[in-house]
Amino acid sequence: MKNLLTIAGSDSCGGAGIQADLKTFSALGAYGMSVITAVTAQNTRGVLSVRDLDSDIVRDQIDCLFEDIRIDAVKIGMVSNAEIIRTIGERLGHHGAARIVVDPVMVSKSGCHLLDPQAEAELVRVLFPLASVVTPNLFETGVITGESIDSVDRMKQAALKICGLGARAVVVKGGHLEGDAVDVVYDGREFHYVSSKRIETKNTHGTGCTYSSAIAAYLAQGYPLLEAVRAAKSYITGAIEHALEIGRGAGPTGHFYDLYRKAGVSYE
């Protein structure tokens, strides 16, 4: 069994962030561990408030895990201020962490800013050079590149720019475009396209967290990047297809849909 670490914020309703990452790791047969960077008060309708942890406890969480347990891959999600970003970068570098997936979480679906705008440049400067792959959605890609991303061609151009900022590889997620959900994968040498059918549902809470965590899980298992992305795309598509009708807003994806099916649990 592979051991995976997520470094991200906690989602009190369990659909995104640390909770989504740990569910994804478990669903894909890995042992999950966490370093919590912030606590959020949120539900399916939006984020009410965010409380950052101090950088000392973030550092101690990272150190105690690497000093005791083999870590096969790391997923980085919500890192909400520059000091925490620098701490994460310094400690991961110190411990020689490998197979790092950076999901540059900036704004929630409800419009709450989860990353201090002053920290955006620090995230790029510190974490992108450590990343095996960076996985921005279209909005995040636009923030990083300073351009509007509204087509596959623009996604390709943006992927080149993001690699120019230090990332070794990029997956630009195209879920917000019309038609099939097409992602552009740039491995530093050539482009690939990974697509799936679009599933009409409002219940997409935590899809980005889940997708990037699945990529980390498959990288830890030894999949080459493109195959890891394809396998993760298949998993997140199934999780969206079996999303849960929980709450009054955007419900969470069904991380354990295959396990629930085997257990005879109904989604109705």
Image: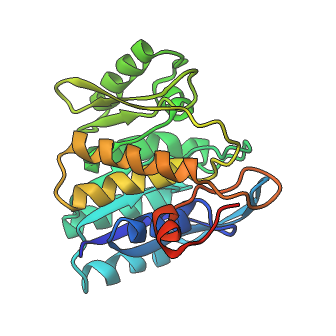
Q: Quadrant of residue 47?
A: bottom right
Which quadrant: the N terminus? bottom left
Q: Position of residue 94 (x, y in %)?
A: 22, 67
The quadrant of the picture occupied by the C terminus is bottom right
Name the residue at 16% across, 26% down.
189
93 sits to left or right of 246:
left
Asked if residue 215 can be seen in this view, the reply is: yes
Residue 99 in sight: no
Please tell me which residue is depicted at 27% across the width and 50% down the height of the picture. 130
* Outermost residue, front side: 264
Give left or right: position of 139 versus 247.
left
The percent position of residue 2, horizontal first and vertical second, equals 24, 72
Q: Looking at the image, which residue is at 63% across and 47% down?
A: 204
Foreground of the two, 89 or 204 = 204
152 up-or-down from 262: above or below: above
What residue is rendered at 75% in x and 56% in y? Answer: 44
